[in-house]
Each structure stands twice: as structure tokens, then as C-alpha cells.
Image: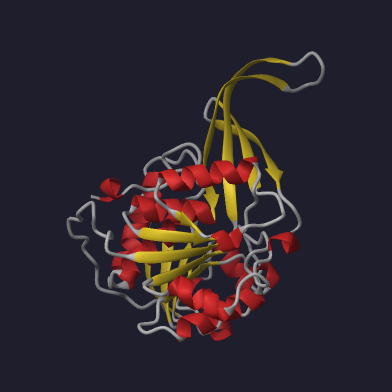
Amino acid sequence: MSLPTPPVTLAILPSHMFSHLNILVLGDLMLDHYIWGDATRISPEAPVPVVHVDRDSYVPGGAANVAANLHGLKVDCSLLGAYAEDEGGAKLEELLSAQGISLERAGKSSAPTIVKTRLVVQRQQMCRIDREAPPREYNLAEQLDTETLVELMKGTQALLISDYAKGVITQELLDQLIEAAAQLQPKPLLLMDPKPKRQLKLQGLDLLTPNRHEALQMAGIPEDPHEAFPSDEVALRLYELTGIPQMVITLGEDGMLLCEKGQVLEHLPTEAQEVFDVSGAGDTVVATLAAALADGRSLGEAARLANRAAGVVIRHVGTYAIQAEELI
């Protein structure tokens, strides 16, 4: 049975609310490329639309989008991941530098920078083209050690691990991160947005933010679209498997679940009024949770802020980072 929790009222928030925080983001860096255009006829060469390109745009993606969301919340953040000295990497560096986000040099890679190109016609995504190497080529564990990670985490209130299963986050690196955090006083919060297909051992983290599919996969429960989400069973199973004390499970249009030590504390309904694009919404949720929890707020208040932020970003077409002013 789900346990009730007292309602949390969000106070009026200043736009600089998290400007005193310092958070490190580590994960799979990507560059999101959008081709915007229109299609009014079918090609004579094949039964496909002919797209007239209007413009191209670029935004940080993956873990870089998590950092962009933190920057939008006025958090001082640095970023570590694998990227190359190629056209995509140069563009990513340019975008992050313009936002004042520090991209750590330890993340340089011989593998190409991951680029996702989306073709959008009349606000609808028609296709996505991915440019990336095999995951093993983005492995950073051999380039980093516990001592280096301790130095990177000094002065931070949180470490946010953004795993897109592209190769950066491995068991070796995760173990190093947990060991490094344990050497610091005060110990930074360890949060992770997971991809469970590689079955990493996650003991030692403070918060996990799986979505519906990921939570069921981690819990070993078959997904049945005709049945309600088994909230209590999933919460208990994930706690038994990982020992992670707090979890926020995002359920898309069904909102999010707040869980603590295997118990469902609350089910928050979504705040979204219009949904144009859910790309990057998970990044916004975990970034807002990290900032609010690092600021000393309760899980309930942090989740409400994250829920509000997600409701804002999915009203935009394409990857969009939340801005502090939009939460006031």
C-alpha cells in the first residue's frame, strides 16, 4: 500500500535560486542537430516526401543537455564525457562555452563525437540519423582514476551521472566514482539517470531516476500495456536489488512516483498542458532534482519542481533546456 505524504507547497522562487551550487555532470555527451523544413510534394524517384530545408540548429544533447538544464537553473556546473576534436566536438564546445559550462579535457576521445540529426517537418519529426562509434570506444575508465575524480568533485554538492548506454558509464568507472565521493567531506549527492540493459551494480548511489520502461526492466517485471503500473511491487523490488534510498520513477503522461526505501511515498500527476516533444524531458527532471536536493530541499519539493520543469520543456519542439525564470 502506498504511504501518504503531506502536501508540499512551492514557495515563490527567485530566478537565482540555485546560483550558489556547484554540480559535476558525467555521462554520454551528444550534439543534437535539427534540420527544419517543409514538404509539399512526393519525390518522383521514390515514394518519399521532398523536404525543402529552411534552417539547421544545434543544441547540447545527452549528458550535455543535463548540464544545459543545470545552467538554465543558474547552477555552476562542469561536464565530463567522451567527445572528439572533430566538427561535432567543436560545435559542442562552442555551445557549452557560450553557456559558461566547463567541458573537462579528460573527456577527449578518438571516437567521433556522437551526433543525432533529426529531420523536423511542420513540427513533426520525420526521422533521426545517428552518428556514433561502438560503446567501447567511448570508455573513459582507463583515462581516469580515483584521485582525478576526487579533484573533479571537490567543492561540488552533487555528482549527476547521465547514462545513455553509449559507453562512458561502465562498472569500473561507476565504482571509481562511488569510491571518490566517499573520500570527500561533506560527501556530494550521487544521482543517476540509468539505462538498465547492461545491469550495472548501483549500490552506493543516493537517487535513481528511471522511466516506466527502465524501472520495469530493472525490477525484472514484464511490461504489460493493458495493466496498471505495479508501483508498490516495483518500488520494493528496486530497493531490494540496489539499496538506493530514494527513487523518482517518471511515468510520462501519468506523472511520476516518489519512492523511499522501497515504499511509494506519493504519485504526482503530470503538470503538462500541451505535449509537443518529450525529447530531453528526462534530462530536465534529473537536473532539477539534483539542484533542488543539493540545495537541501525535501524529495517532495524537489520532485514538484522537476515535475513543473518537465511540463515546461515538453511544450517545445526539439531538445530544450529549462530556464529558472520559467519556474517562478
Q: 19 or 107, which lies in front?
A: 107
With 55 as the anchor, is 165 left or right in this view?
right
Q: Position of residue 180 (x, y in %)?
A: 51, 81
Q: Position of residue 42 (x, y in %)?
A: 72, 16
Q: Nearer the viewer, residue 94 or 253?
A: 94
Which is nearer the eye, 223 or 184?
184
Say above or below: 203 vs 15.
Answer: below
Its colouring scheme is secondary structure
Judged left or right of residue 211, residue 313 is left
| Residue shown at the point (42%, 47%) measured from the top left | 321
Q: Is residue 263 above or below residue 105?
A: below
**Viewer can see residue 128:** yes
Q: Quadrant of residue 43?
A: top right
Locate the N terminus and report the quarter of the image it occupies. Answer: bottom left
Residues 247 and 174: in front is 174
Task: Please count the marks in the image.
Answer: 0
Q: Measured from the top left, where is residue 221 in percent x and y?
A: 64, 72
- Image location (x, y in percent) of residue 161: 52, 67
